[in-house]
Image (cartoon, rainbow, N blue to C red):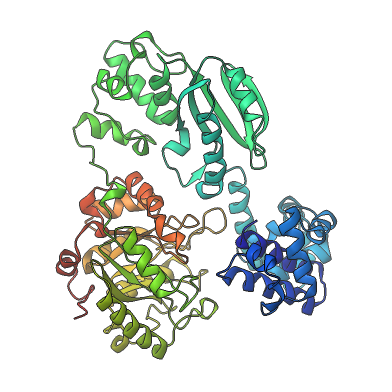
């Protein structure tokens, strides 16, 4: 198990003990151990082999024993016993917006609530009203957060399914019976949240696919239904493998990639061309043809999978007005990342050198500002010291420009966490909301627009504050924000962190159509995070963006010209 996975085990133990009402000192021991392990730069396996676990601050005999147990067996009996006692779903309660560990503990101890479904019953039967400090407004807020999670339970963020998807793909790709394969459905369209994991496979018989998948530990219940292997992964998430012949392979890709709306429009086109429609009963004319051939037969150019979510791309194709979508290779920079000066785990030099190795022409170091105390935000003095270090490293690095920046908190009144005289010394300012999510739409919109109006702000970071599958975005009039960004020459971020992918594609498309530059950034907190820009590119493509719509595709000189005063020189 990795350090992060072991850290999560101890975090969960701390939360479970607190929910249970255990001694607060003991809960803090596990929470501190989790935080310490998360920040380690050395693998726990190495430290254990060298007998150095006890040298880590906060790691005593009990924690050391559990770490060794996990490293040797992959399990922790103490954790397993807690789960068995309290129920496997009790930790889901703290994922509800507005429900912290203490409130989840009250639900568990006073009402016996052990899962989201238990909480739903407690709300619907008015049992929450019996609890102290549970007024209508609080209950309404909890109900709203619960409804969001209930809707998400049947879906999975792409980041959660990606490791399993890669395992399934590699397993099938190494099977001698499989001639070729591709992801399809939601995954091929690069949806941020998936309803299923689907693949198209060219093979002789579906039974061979079942035998191969039976060896994958994450796959359960594989069976054949009309040449489709159906199974489940990740606690009941649907997996479908469409088994097809060579002649029908690419037609099957079209049928399984497009949404029902997209396919309905294609079939209407087929009718107008007096040919048979294309669906699971593939017509003869579609066989032994590529996807491009099939679209051409219907009077269309090839439509990228990311644009097959609705009928708009068909209308644009008929009008010869499809965008030339941005490619990952078009990116020249990364303008949002964190180091160990705040809550990152890589040093400033490590982040710079890794970015250079990835081929970036320029980057911005943007650690958190003072108000983000939980993220070890920089005070003014620490920021000035970091600016100096950035300048020194920049002078040493050949072939890449390193900009001094900050991810500055937007305070509740829309002012920024640093005064203008400090902001003026930065090359890049990413202004973001990290607290006060419960404001009304009117208040939140005014808050962000005031930040846009600040002459030193380069872009708005993760503009809606959403966390996929965990927290909906805050209430905001996105159209008003987009118009303000257009009026003031401020970029909006597409945050490539897989937990965020914020903005969503519909807002990206609207922003691009109104002349707002979008900036695809990794929001990296570790060295490996710097290589996840493709997640943001997928969102940009689903938002119909071309190369010219994205700030990161321009040279630094061009960006400074396009955004005078908002991207400053550091000579």
Say which residue appears at 62% left-offset and 46% top-offset. Answer: 153
Say which residue appears at 51% left-offset and 76% top-offset. Answer: 375
**Residue in front for this viewpoint, 83 or 263:** 83
Q: Quadrant of residue 484?
A: bottom left
How far from the left and from the top, in percent, is residue 274?
Answer: 29, 10
- Tell me if residue 256 comes above or below residue 395 in the rendering: above
Q: Quadrant of residue 231?
A: top right
How far from the left and from the top, in percent, is residue 422?
Answer: 32, 87
- Tell me if residue 479 comes above or below residue 242 in the rendering: below
Image label count: 0
Image quarter of the C terminus:
bottom left
Image-based side of 202 in relation to 55, left or right: left
Say which residue appears at 27% left-offset and 43% top-offset. Answer: 325
Say which residue appears at 38% left-offset and 22% top-offset. Answer: 250
Image-based side of 421 in relation to 340, left or right: left
How far from the left and from the top, in percent, is residue 553?
Answer: 23, 56
- Tell me if residue 519 comes above or below residue 258 in the rendering: below
**Res. 457 visible in picture:** no
**Residue in front for this viewpoint, 485 or 177:** 177
Image quarter of the N terminus:
bottom right
- Tell me if residue 536 comes above or below residue 456 in the rendering: above
Q: Quadrant of residue 69?
A: bottom right
How far from the left and from the top, in percent, is residue 415?
Answer: 37, 81
Image-based side of 511 in relation to 555, left or right: right
**Residue in front for this viewpoint, 30 or 459:** 30
């Amino acid at each position: 198990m990795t350090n992060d996975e072991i850290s999560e085990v101890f975090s969960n133990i701390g939360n479970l003990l607190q929910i249970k009402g255990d001694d607060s000192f003991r809960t803090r021991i596990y929470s501190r151990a989790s935080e310490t392990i998360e920040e380690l730069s050395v693998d726990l396996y190495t430290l254990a082999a060298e007998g150095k676990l006890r040298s880590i601050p906060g790691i005593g005999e009990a924690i050391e024993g559990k770490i060794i147990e996990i490293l040797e067996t992959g399990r922790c009996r103490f954790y397993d016993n807690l789960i068995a006692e309290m129920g496997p779903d009790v930790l889901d309660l703290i994922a509800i917006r507005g429900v912290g560990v203490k409130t989840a503990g009250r639900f568990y101890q006073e009402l016996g609530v052990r899962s989201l479904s238990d909480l739903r019953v407690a709300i619907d039967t008015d049992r929450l009203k019996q609890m102290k400090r549970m007024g209508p407004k609080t209950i309404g807020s909890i109900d709203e957060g619960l409804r969001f999670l209930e809707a998400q339970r049947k879906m999975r963020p792409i980041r959660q399914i990606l490791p399993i998807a890669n395992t399934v793909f590699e397993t099938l790709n190494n099977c001698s019976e499989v001639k070729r394969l591709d992801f399809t459905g939601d995954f091929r369209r690069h949806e941020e949240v998936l309803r299923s994991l689907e693949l198209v496979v060219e093979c002789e018989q579906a039974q061979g696919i079942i035998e191969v998948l039976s060896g994958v530990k994450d796959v359960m219940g594989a069976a054949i239904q009309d040449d489709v292997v159906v199974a489940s992964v990740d606690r009941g998430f649907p997996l479908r493998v469409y088994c097809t012949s060579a002649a029908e392979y690419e037609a099957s890709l079209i049928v399984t990639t497009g949404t029902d709306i997209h396919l309905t429009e294609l079939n209407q086109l087929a009718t107008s061309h007096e040919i048979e429609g294309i669906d699971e009963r593939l017509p003869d004319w579609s066989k032994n043809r590529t996807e491009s051939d099939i679209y051409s037969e219907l009077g269309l150019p090839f439509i990228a999978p990311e644009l097959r979510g609705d009928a708009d791309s068909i209308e644009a194709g008929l009008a010869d007005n499809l965008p030339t979508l941005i490619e990952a290779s078009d990116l020249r920079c990364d303008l949002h990342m964190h180091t160990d000066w705040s809550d990152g785990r890589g040093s400033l030099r490590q982040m710079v050198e890794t970015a250079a190795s990835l081929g970036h022409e320029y980057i911005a170091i943007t650690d958190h500002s003072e108000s983000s105390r939980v993220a070890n935000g920089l005070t003014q003095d620490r920021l000035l010291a970091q600016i100096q270090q950035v300048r020194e490293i920049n002078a040493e690095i050949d072939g890449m420009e390193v900009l001094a920046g900050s991810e500055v908190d937007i305070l509740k009144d829309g002012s920024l966490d640093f005064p203008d005289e400090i902001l003026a010394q930065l090359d890049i300012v990413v202004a973001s909301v990290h607290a006060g999510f419960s404001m009304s739409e009117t208040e939140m919109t005014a808050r962000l627009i005031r930040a846009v109006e600040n002459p030193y702000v380069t872009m708005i970071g993760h503009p809606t504050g959403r966390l996929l599958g965990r927290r909906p975005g805050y209430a905001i009039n996105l159209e008003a924000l987009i118009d303000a960004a257009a009026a003031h020459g401020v970029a909006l971020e597409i945050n490539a962190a897989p937990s965020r992918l914020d903005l969503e594609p519909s807002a990206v498309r609207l922003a691009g159509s109104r002349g707002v530059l979008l900036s695809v950034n990794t929001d990296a907190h570790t060295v490996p995070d710097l290589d996840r820009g493709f997640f943001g590119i997928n969102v940009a493509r689903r938002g119909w963006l071309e190369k010219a719509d994205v700030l990161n595709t321009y040279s630094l000189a061009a960006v400074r010209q396009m955004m005078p005063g908002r991207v400053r020189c550091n000579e």
